[in-house]
Image (spheres, rainbow, N blue to C red):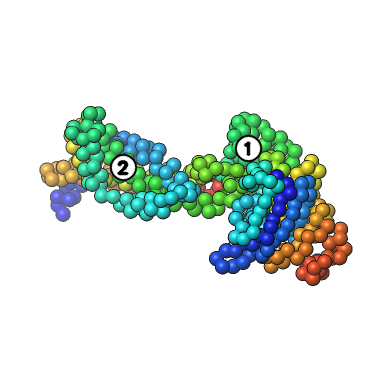
């Protein structure tokens, strides 16, 4: 299913162009971080890659597969919790894939244990705090053992300790071979996790640069301006 | 005015002294309408959910039809079921005409469009919030429909209560297919119609009070469920 190729992808809604002519190549095992200002189109780009939105022009291709693979998962910027227990939520993706319920719950429980959320397992998921929901949503995505994981601001509303544990979780998944594509506004986090940085500005890819080089000296004007805004 | 207050006192006396005849009628009403709602819901909830999440041709037409049929005249439903169940009709061999079963079937048909249309609305509202998440997790449309029914269970239970309220207050359909036979198919609404025309106002009024209380209770219950469910994500 790799590489994931975006070939001149554009996306428009109601006459508004949101993405323009995006060319992009994601290879197996890479960790790409997408940076860019609010409203640049990062979340839309992730949805197009994940297959939730069909591009209005250009193509998304997965290696030589005819259809998008099922071995992918996404953590949304605003995850939706189902009206059931945390455990039920984390097991859901396995259950709809036909894994027997008991087996699914056992594997979900293992993942919750591993990410330190075992104590929340029986709680109704919708009453969790925003940060807890985000962590549960990451566990829910990880339980599927996807070969590629899309993360849209996975640490947007979590405390420093949780942020550290989520980053460790992402690094572990990446270390185990999962391809990661991630959006973040934490430049420190991008520095710690990224191999490549994709900079998106106003729906266009300004550059796609290896991370060390990007933070040294971005190639595009837009990215240079963006980095300058970082507070010490 | 005198007849009214005299009847009212007599009606209250009937209720307080536990008139068996009256309670029999109330019990049959409850049973017929309960079965009708269960029967209709078994088809209407899945139909509404599939109409909300499905992407098939004719979906919009079906939705418009359902919405239109929400206000179906009860007598027309009664007449249709009568024709189906009458001895010469296609289902005549079951001998169901003038039985409580026939009444439940008629009421089920009557409330089906209401239940399906309202549950489609409920599920569709949830779908707009859940769609991307469920598709991302790998749920098919059928699985998503089922998940949405489970997740909107409290809103859907108020839909069922609305259906029950419509069924139990209806008179045209049960009158035609039940025949209002004393002790067999006589329910509150048909009894009220009959007793009023016979001039037995206390019994009619007593039944009317019970019916009114039941409908109010059902609505209060629906309201309570809404508040209770809104109090926290259960
Ligand atoms: N479904 C949609 N219909 C119409 N416009 C949309 C839709 N989704 C996104 N947009 C628009 O596309 C633009 C990009 O949105 P997107 O959510 O991708 O931004 P983003 O880069 O993720 O921003 P943020 O950093 O705030 O999350 C915005 O102007 C938004 O209003
Ligand atoms: Mg976004």
Q: Is residue B55 visible?
A: yes
Q: CA distance from mark 1 to mark 2?
A: 38 Å
Image location of residue A27, percent across then percent down: 76, 49
Which residue is outermost to the front?
A64
**Identity of the residue drawn at 29% across and 37% down:** B104
Which element carries disc 1, helix, strand or loop?
helix
> Pointer 2 indicates a residue of which chain?
B
In the picture, the disc for residue B109 is 2
- Quickly name the residue at label 1: A94
Question: At x 69% / y 40%, what residue is drawn?
Answer: A143
In the picture, measured across the screen, residue B184 lies left or right of residue A101, that is left
Residue B26 visible here: no
Please give the chain letter of the residue carrying mark 1: A
Measured along the vertical axis of the image, is residue B210 above or below residue B100? below
Q: Position of residue A29 (x, y in %)?
A: 78, 46
Q: Position of residue A12 (x, y in %)?
A: 60, 64
């Amino acid at each position: 299913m790799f590489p994931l190729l975006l070939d001149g992808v554009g996306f428009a809604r109601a006459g508004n162009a949101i993405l323009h002519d995006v060319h992009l190549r994601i290879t197996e095992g890479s960790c790409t971080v997408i940076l860019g200002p609010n409203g640049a189109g990062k979340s839309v780009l992730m949805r197009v890659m994940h297959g939730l939105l069909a591009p209005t022009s250009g193509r998304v291709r997965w290696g030589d597969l005819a259809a998008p693979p099922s071995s992918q998962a996404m953590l949304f910027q605003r995850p939706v919790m189902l009206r059931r227990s945390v455990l039920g939520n984390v097991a859901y993706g396995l259950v709809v894939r036909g894994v027997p319920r008991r087996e699914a719950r056992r594997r979900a429980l293992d993942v919750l244990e591993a990410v330190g959320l075992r104590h929340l397992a029986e709680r109704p998921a919708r009453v969790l705090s925003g940060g807890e929901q985000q962590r549960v949503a990451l566990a829910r995505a990880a339980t599927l053992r996807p070969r590629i994981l899309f993360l849209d601001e996975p640490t947007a509303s979590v405390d420093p300790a949780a942020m550290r544990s989520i980053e460790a979780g992402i690094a572990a998944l990446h270390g185990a071979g999962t391809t990661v594509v991630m959006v973040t506004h934490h430049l420190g986090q991008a520095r710690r996790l990224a191999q490549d940085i994709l900079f998106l500005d106003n729906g266009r890819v300004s550059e796609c640069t290896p991370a060390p080089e990007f933070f040294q000296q971005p190639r595009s004007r837009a990215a240079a301006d963006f980095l300058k805004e970082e507070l010490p | 005015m005198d007849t009214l207050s005299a009847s009212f006192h007599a009606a209250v006396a009937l209720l307080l002294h536990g008139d068996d005849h009256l309670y029999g009628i109330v019990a049959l009403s409850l049973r017929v309408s309960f079965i009708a709602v269960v029967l209709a819901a078994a088809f209407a909830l899945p139909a509404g959910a599939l109409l909300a999440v499905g992407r098939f041709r004719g979906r919009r037409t079906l939705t418009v039809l359902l919405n239109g049929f929400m206000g179906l005249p009860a007598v027309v439903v009664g007449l249709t079921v009568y024709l189906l169940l009458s001895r010469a009709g296609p289902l005549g061999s079951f001998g169901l005409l003038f039985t409580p079963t026939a009444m439940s079937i008629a009421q089920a048909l009557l409330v089906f469009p209401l239940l399906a249309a309202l549950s489609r609305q409920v599920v569709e509202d949830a779908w707009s919030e859940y769609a991307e998440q469920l598709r991302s997790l790998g749920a098919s449309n059928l699985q998503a429909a089922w998940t949405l029914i489970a997740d909107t269970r409290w809103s859907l239970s108020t839909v069922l209560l609305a259906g029950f309220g419509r069924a139990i207050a209806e008179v045209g359909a049960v009158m035609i297919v039940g025949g209002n036979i004393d002790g067999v198919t006589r329910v509150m609404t048909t009894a009220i119609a009959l007793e009023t025309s016979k001039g037995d106002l206390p019994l009619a009024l007593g039944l009317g009070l019970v019916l009114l209380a039941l409908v109010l209770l059902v609505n209060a219950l629906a309201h309570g469920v809404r508040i209770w469910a809104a109090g926290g994500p259960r």
